[in-house]
Amino acid sequence: MDKDRIEGSATNVGGKIKEGAGKLTGDEKLRSEGVADQVKGKVQNAVGGIKDAIKGR
């Protein structure tokens, strides 16, 4: 695994936490930021997967 996959996974988890906190507190902005972070994390994780595939891992 490379740095992109690790960071992507961490961003995704952080986004899930933000989204949950936003739902719990009724903070729509925080919930939206959490969803956006999840998307960013998934994209970053996918880029890392592509890099791994290119490197033959």
Image: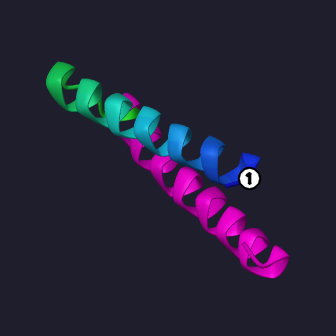
Q: Residue at x 78, y 70 (%)?
A: 51
Q: Where 50 sits versus 47, above or below? A: below
Give the quarter of the image for residue 50.
bottom right
* Front residue of this view, candidates 23 and 49: 49
> In the orientation shown, which residue stands out farthest toward the right?
55
Q: Where 18 sits versus 47, above or below? A: above
Q: Position of residue 22 (x, y in %)?
A: 28, 28
SS under mark 1: loop
* Magenta-highlighted residues: 30-57
On whether residue 50 falls in the magenta region, the answer is: yes
Q: Quadrant of the C terminus?
A: bottom right
Q: Quadrant of the N terminus?
A: bottom right
On whether residue 48 falls in the magenta region, the answer is: yes
Q: Residue at x 81, y 80 (%)?
A: 54
Give the quarter of the image for residue 52.
bottom right
Residue 49 lies left or right of residue 31; in this view the side is right
Residue type at mark 1: give it: Asp
Residue 13 lies left or right of residue 41; in this view the side is left
Q: Which class describes the residues within 10 Å of circle 1: few (<14), some (14-19), or many (20+)?
A: few
